[in-house]
Amino acid sequence: MADLRDTLETHVSKGLLPGAVGLVARGDRIEVEAVGSVDVEGTAPMGRDSIFRIASITKPIVAAAVMMLVEEGRIALDDPVEQWLPELASPSVVRTPAAPVDDVVPAVRPITVFHLLGSRAGYGFPSDFSLPAVAPLLSELKQGPPQPQSVPAPDAWMAALSRIPLLHQPGDGWLYNISSDLQGVLIARVTGRPLPEFLAERLFEPLGMADTAFVVPADKLDRFTAYYRTGPEGGPELVDAADGQWSSPPAFPSGAGGLVSTAHDWLAFGRMLLAEGTAAGRRMLTPASVRQMTANHLSPSERRSAGLFLDGMGWGFGGAVDVEIVEPWNVPGRYGWVGGTGTTAHITPSTGTVTIMLSQLEMGGPSFPALMRDFWRYAAERRP
């Protein structure tokens, strides 16, 4: 059986991406490898403490922050969000998912905190990106691959969202991404504090996640990786350099995918979830909240409608939950997600395992890249 270094090196050596970091932890045993370099120029070798744009594995972190507010009684799962997000007080809904954006009906129920946490608010991406109501999500809200310096500030972003119809009625189905951005805005408005400030005080500092933020300061840029997509010749094509879009604070800190982090930082978060909300002797969340986060809340029909997004998986709060064994790495109850910048992080409560792989190559669609699949296969083979 190939070891972790070989698993990563197989892909890096082909020139498809400059480097990667992989981590598999079970209890006190941590296996971590860093291969390749931080960029295609080989400016510096990849390190275990290299910093990556983690994209959508931001989502579980932001969902955990929302659950903190629920536990404090500042919001409730069944609360309509319009009291904090008045832009969503009277949303319209396209008559059918394929209808033009001006063929709408009123929403029959309010959008609730529960709808946001479960990505069932009615806003977001379906399996068919060609639907008319999807286009303004990309053009006006800058959804898609993260581009933090292009997204307007939260109030302007919310105003734009209020002019876009929902794809379906609140609570009637799962759609990807926007609910997590709305969670970030919700946290800021409920607390009266910027999202980065709240996350730093309530999660990152207590958990020792020293390199997790929405911006990379100048004294850490030497550890920050460049970000690529696959170019026309098949090799990596630069999207964002280390001193690019994440070198200054964004106007819109994206709860759906704006964070940078390291493998060891996300490990601290994952271990907190495995310990049912406790870290370093401190209670961050109750066991009930963690179980609610990491449980599947989707019906079989909702999972089927998600298509490739959720093959064999359901959805909890901020992350997917394995419900079927379709591949060797699927374990019922495994919770986590992937990031469009080439990242993946999961916890498996039944084995006490945290698995994290961070790379720099943008995913080309909802199907999982070969590197991720090989990493998951390796992690599954390491199970006790």
Image (spheres, rainbow, N blue to C red):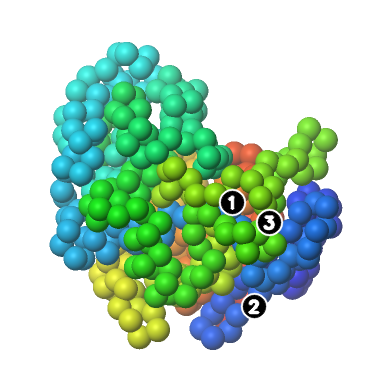
Vertical side of 3 occupied by 103: above or below: above
Is residue 326 among what the camera can see?
no
Which residue carries the number 3 mark? Answer: 225
Q: Secondary structure at mark 1?
A: loop
Rendering coords of residue 44 (x, y %): 78, 63
Identity, as a three-letter code, of the amino acid under mark 1: Ser
- Say left or right for 158 vs 261: left
Query: Farthest residue in the front direction?
Result: 218
Please identify the quadrant where the C terminus is shown: bottom right
The answer to the question of whether label 2 and label 3 lie on touching residues, with beta carbons closer than 8 A, is no
Q: Nearer the viewer, residue 26 or 259?
A: 259
The circle drawn on residue 247 is 1
Q: In percent of the image, x 23 and y 40: which residue is there?
A: 85
Q: Earlier in the sequence, mark 1 or mark 2?
A: 2
Q: Earlier in the sequence, mark 3 or mark 1?
A: 3
Identity, as a three-letter code, of the amino acid under mark 3: Thr
Vertical side of 14 occupied by 80: above or below: above
Rendering coords of residue 5 (x, y %): 75, 70
Q: In percent of the image, x 62 and y 75: which residue is there?
A: 382
Vertical side of 178 occupied by 5: above or below: below
Label 1 and label 2: CA atoms lie apart by 30 Å
Identity, as a three-letter code, of the amino acid under mark 2: Glu
The number of discs equals: 3
Rendering coords of residue 276 (x, y %): 34, 75
Q: In percent of the image, x 39 and y 38: which residue is there?
A: 153
Q: Residues within 10 Å of mark 3 (few under 14, many from 20)?
A: many
The answer to the question of whether label 1 and label 2 lie on touching residues, with beta carbons closer than 8 A, is no
Q: Residues within 10 Å of mark 1 (few under 14, many from 20)?
A: some
Q: In percent of the image, x 80 and y 42: which residue is there?
A: 235
Which residue carries the number 2 mark? Answer: 31
Q: Secondary structure at mark 3?
A: loop
Q: Nearer the viewer, residue 340 or 182?
A: 182
